[in-house]
Image (cartoon, grey):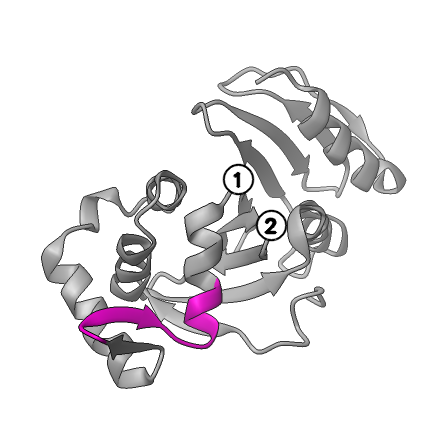
Amino acid sequence: MTTQTEEIPALLITEHELIALIALAGTDAALRCQTLFRLDHASGAPLEQAGVSTLLERGLMKIDNDSLQPVGPAATVTAVLADATSWLETALVTPTSEHVSFMFGAEQGALLLNLNKYGVHELHPLTGSEGMIATAVQMADYYLNQAPDGFPAAATTRQHFNDGTSRAVHVKAEADGSLSIAAGEGENLKASPLSPEQFNARIRAGLEQYPG
């Protein structure tokens, strides 16, 4: 899949390194990221210290006057974690795979966190909040319209807010490739037909108009 993230190589990061950067950021926004990334259960001194150790070893962190300082791309990640004001979550299910990713953004920019089941994740830079939405739509379009893994397939794009609420848009591709879209949380949501030409606009409209 071609995305706007490909020009800059991904930063590989483990869960314990991510926990260490979240702790270093130390803000409510960073803790919100930790919760959304499903890392609350893993946070704490042992894994945080392990993350610090490997970040130091990789040259992504340094000790300056007895203080830990992120370096290079890790500094950018920490800054966005610290000031994040927007969050998107995508979940993709195909006949051969399941994929979850998170996007988080601040004034400094935005990042895409692609989760890996082996615990070594990828971080890609994006072009702000608009880049987050565009990337989420692009990912859904790739797996449901171009369908490299076949049908049926499903994509959920969920926008999270500071107050704990969210807006979700669900798109399904049936075995024959026909598309439908629904907005909301829970089961038995009212779905309507979706044409490939409407894909981008309808997902964006659902994220904007569905009352969280």
**Residue found at x 60% / y 41%:** 155
Question: Of residues 33 and 190, which is closer to you in this image?
Answer: 33
> Disc 1 vs disc 2: Cβ atoms closer than 8 Å?
yes
**Residue found at x 53% / y 73%:** 10
> In what element is the residue under mark 2?
loop
In the image, residue 52 lies at what x, y percent? 22, 70
**Left or right position of 38 against 93:** left
Question: Of residues 138 and 61, which is closer to you in this image?
Answer: 61
What residue occupies the far front of the structure in this picture?
65
Please tell me the numbered disc located at residue 172: none
The image quadrant where one finds the C terminus is top right
Residue type at mark 1 is Thr
User: In front: mark 1 or mark 2?
Assistant: 2
Q: Quadrant of residue 1?
A: bottom right
Residue type at mark 2 is Glu
Residue at which label 2 appears: 107
Residue at which label 1 appears: 85
Q: In the displayed structure, would residue 85 be above or below residue 18?
A: above
Question: Of residues 107 and 203, which is closer to you in this image?
Answer: 107
If you read the primary sequence from the N terminus, does the residue marked by circle 1 or circle 2 appear first? 1
**Left or right position of 23 against 112:** left
